[in-house]
Image: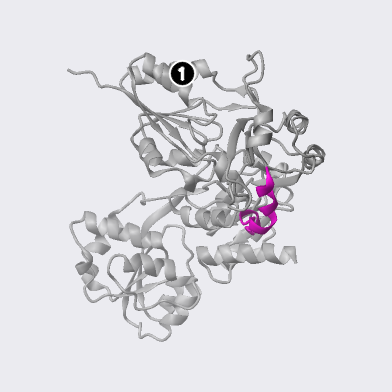
Amino acid sequence: MENKKGKVYLVGAGPGDPGLITLKGKECIERADVIVYDFLASVSFLKYAKKEAEIIYAGKQGGNHSMSQGNINALITQKAKEGHIVTRLKGGDPFIFGRGAEEAEVLAENNISFEIVPGITSAIAAPAYAGIPLTHRSLTSTVAFVTGHENPEKEKSGINWEALVKGIGTIVFFMGVKNLPNIVDNLTANGMPPDASIALVQWGTTPKHSSISGKLSDIVERVKAAGFKPPAVIVVGDVVKLRDALCWYEKKPLLGKRIVVTRAREQASELVNLLYENGAECIELPTIKVEPPDDLSPLDKAIENLSTYDWIIFTSANGVSFFFDRLFSKGRDVRSLGSLKTAVIGPATEKKLHGYGIKSDIVPDSYIAESIIDSFKKEEVKGKKIMLPRASEARAILPEKLIEMGAFVDEITAYKTSAVCDESVDLIRELKNKTIDMVTFTSSSTVINFAALLPAGIIGELMKDIAVAAIGPVTADTAKKMGMEVQIIANSFTIPGLCEAILQYYEKRQD
């Protein structure tokens, strides 16, 4: 049997914003057997990896190295020799101060096939997010990228400071925060005026992004006073003067806010994306997972007898998904619903149902069970048979009220929610240190399971000064019963409605 040949992709993961990875880079993550990633490569990219892929962290941060460069070189070489497809995920661009060339040289020496996948370097992206163009027709047509931290083993500096000062309009320094005083001294010693403009951009393109600007003469003190720390890029030149006018990213309303999303991981993307688009750092802490019920026979029986029902009511998008998945697994399709009328609890459920080609007959104005009941008061339901496929732990009010109205209701468990404990986040430590700004809840079950992660009796203390956002009044009431103060209740009980309520909350706090 022919041995499988390994290959290494040296991939630039971009500057931090997950949206800035290239399509080619994403494809390399998807096909990799082994992924070796850096400190500055966003862990959110790992969601593209195959489930069976081996994930290895090889980050180097401020002298704290989880793996030396020599060991990294040996690792990717060995994995490739074993026949694996290896994606070496590096922050920024692998060939711009990323030591990608050193890794490529080792691969070449070992006759291992490799490809270089360029990435967006922080030298370009971080200033752009701070509103600083590196070139400008009226200001400069030259730019230089310079390391702010040269190889300590060099006998003398390889930087021609005089040439930089006299010949380059914009200078961008990598990894130079700790060496800032020396950079300033070398620039001024070689003729750059003390009032030359300079800026530092920290964690550029990420929710931790911040920037500070000044002159060569005062920037060291400004940075010290602000407590600015790596990673950051330094930009020197007249283009820095455009920062105040062109800064756009720092105007995002949720920038710097750390928000916990407790929704099931497979459903969290919409809320995470909306919050991230507004600048928030989202901490995904799914407290529930959605799965089929332990006993599918009641649902199977209801599907076999679909023709005997007059109505089917869906109270969640999950209910729609699990119902149709089971319907299709029994060899049936949407035609089996025949003349059944349908009702849904809100627009998300309506959209999900419409995806199966069915337009709902009832969509209430308000997205809670009580509103469905009000809508059915306009219908003749006495003697009608209604199927209600939903979660095992759903509230009883809907079937009770429909029965009072004279309907025959079959309450069918289509799915269940189970508690999840995600150990990737040290929740109690984060809450104690007040490093979380807000926790969001999209259902009562997310509240209950979140509370179960905390020590009994001190929930109120842990959640003090941390805002709580609930998708609606039912979820809010559950949070209050658990000892939490609820600051935000969405007017529209949807994910976009919850995000809008969060934005309004922070907007009011700024007034």
Q: Nearer the viewer, residue 477 or 304?
A: 477
Q: Residues within 10 Å of mark 1 (few under 14, many from 20)?
A: some
Q: Nearer the viewer, residue 123 or 501?
A: 123
Q: Is residue 23 left or right of residue 197?
A: left
- The quadrant holding residue 359 is bottom left
Question: Measuring 36% from the left and 49% from the top, which residue is drawn there?
Answer: 294
Tell me residue 441's x, y (percent). 57, 57
Q: Does residue 45 lie above or below 382 as drawn?
A: above
Q: Nearer the viewer, residue 361 or 259?
A: 259
For label 1, the SS is helix
Magenta extent: 237-254
Q: Amino acid at mark 1?
A: Asn
Q: Is residue 213 left or right of residue 319?
A: right
Report whether residue 175 is seen: yes
- Magenta region includes residue 278: no
- The quadrant holding residue 435 is top right
What quarter of the picture does the N terminus occupy?
top left
Q: Does residue 423 lie above or below 409 as drawn?
A: above
Q: Does residue 496 lie above or below 14 as drawn?
A: below
- The quadrant holding residue 413 is bottom left
Question: Measuring 48% from the left and 77% from the top, which residue is drawn there?
Answer: 371
Magenta segment, prevailing SS (helix, strand or loop): helix
Q: Which residue is mark 1?
A: 73
